[in-house]
Image (tube, rainbow, N blue to C red):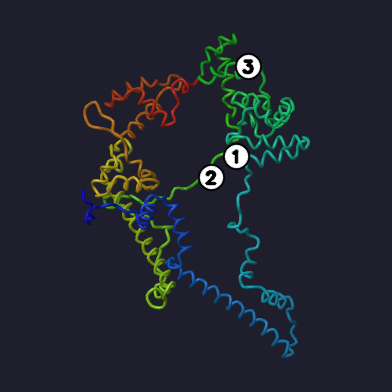
Amino acid sequence: MALDLRQSLKLSQQLLMTPQLQQAIKLLQLSRIELEQFVSQQLAENPILEEASESQDNAEKDSVERTSDDVMQDQLSSVSSIVDDVAEGEKKEIDWEALSRVQEASSQPASANKKSHDDEHPNYENLSSNRKSLTEHLMTQIGESELDQDEKNLAAILIGNLSEKGYLDLDWDEFCKEQDIDVDYAEGVLDTLQRLHPPGIAARSLQECLLIQIREHHLKNGVVEKVVSQHMKELEIRNYAVIAKSMKISLDEVVKNAATIAELDPIPAREFGGDPTYHVIPDVYVFKMSGKWVVSLNDEGLPNLRINSFYKEIAQDRANGKDKEYVQEKLKSAQWLIKSIQQRQKTIFKVTECIVEKQKDFFEKGVQFLKPMVLRDIAEDIGMHESTISRVTTSKYVHTPRGIFELKYFFNSSVARAGGGDVASESVKVMIKGIVDSESPQKPYSDQKIVAILEEKGVRLARRTVAKYREQLGILPSSKRKKYF
């Protein structure tokens, strides 16, 4: 069989993810804060890019320089007039204090003279919060205690193992074994640590945390301690009848002591915990004007980028060789970044406009009228892929007369109504919350009862679905919602 070589042509299509396309996709999914950080980084790395307000900054600098010159000229004029008076031999008494003040002022920059008038007022821009962390707060108290150095070192290790809520997050016996220390010795150091502020700190369980606070607050009456130490499970589910029967006391006495226990804090590090608060900056505004809903992009805070004219001229005429290649590369990168940001803003505007059109009832009447909607509904209307809509609506916020919402909020699964038609799952959650808010605290509705109430309103749900929605809303089960006091 003979072998031969042949050439053939084959046509095919494939999508290549160029660096520019990857950057455009990345910009699309960034939140507003992340976009601002990314743009600041690009401004620092790319000399071709600049902010459009730079000329205004230069004008302000020129104004400041002129002001400084004027102040200096006035000072020199004052000195000159005083010297002239002396030279003429006038008999009037010279104000030496005034001359001294002028000389002192002339030896300082104009900015210092201006600031001297406000010395009595603090510069609030330079002030920062000095709030201590939990670790710093405890270490300060340990440093003032009577523990020896070895005990302080052990206390520092224990403090380092505290959780955000203030609990000791480790296996106690295993810890003592690893540190090769006596359990009784470690218990003594731990007892000292547990007597520090805030009360209940360094507890190994909720039960121990409550017992420490009972000790610190001098709440010992024989009943409170026994309820916490022996009936924690029943206390959690509020089964006061079982506690009363076991302790052979009246139900009223159990309820009274349970109310005292409820005043204790199960999270001892509450005042030191919590993440810093971040304010949501809306990407787009929706408001009603002349009877129509209007969408407006929020460009405030986003740098107004432009190409530096000096480097643009270099790229066209002056540069040659490697320099020209470098400048042209940076120029293309800058142009693509500006185009990508503009495209990102246009896409957000287009998606929001489509959402407003489909969810008019929500904007007009409220959450109860939110319609079921999926990404495909928007993607088909504006001619984009669902993945693009997903990126656009993630971490993007819209300011409306009804509050600030993430764009993802408007996409809900549907729940069938008994009489036909669908209702959004978010609307059903609002119904469940309304039902729970209207219940009697002494007789809260069970999940099955909520199912029955929803069915009366034409919404059919399984009990497990109600339980799932209730948990998403952060609502406790009926056994834990029941109140005796």
Q: Which circle marks residue 272 in the picture?
A: 1
374 above or below 66?
above
| Mark 1 or mark 3, earlier in chain | 3
235 above or below 390?
above
Q: Is residue 413 left or right of residue 70?
A: left
What percent of the width, then of the height, locates residue 259?
Answer: 57, 22
Q: Mark 3 points at which residue?
A: 226
Dots 1 and 3: beta carbons under 8 Å?
no
Q: Is residue 175 left or right of residue 432?
A: right
Tag 3's secondary structure? helix
Task: State how far apart marks 3 and 2 are (Cα).
Answer: 39 Å
What percent of the width, then of the height, locates residue 428?
Answer: 33, 31
Q: In which quarter of the image is residue 51?
A: bottom left
Task: State how far apart marks 1 and 3 are (Cα).
Answer: 30 Å
**Crowd rating for badge 2 (residues with CA inside 10 Å; few <14, some 14–19, many 20+):** few
What percent of the width, then of the height, locates residue 404?
Answer: 39, 45
Q: Name the residue under label 2.
A: 276
Q: Is residue 184 left or right of residue 255?
A: right
**Crowd rating for badge 3 (residues with CA inside 10 Å; few <14, some 14–19, many 20+):** some
Q: Quadrant of residue 248?
A: top right
326 above or below 443?
below
- Residue at figure coordinates x 41%, y 76% from the top left: 320
Tag 2's secondary structure? loop
Dots 3 and 2: beta carbons under 8 Å?
no
Tag 1's secondary structure? loop
| Mark 3 or mark 2, earlier in chain | 3
Near-viewer residue (379 or 73): 379
The type of residue carrying mark 3 is Lys
**Crowd rating for badge 1 (residues with CA inside 10 Å; few <14, some 14–19, many 20+):** some
What percent of the width, then of the height, locates residue 185?
Answer: 74, 27
Near-viewer residue (159 or 258): 159
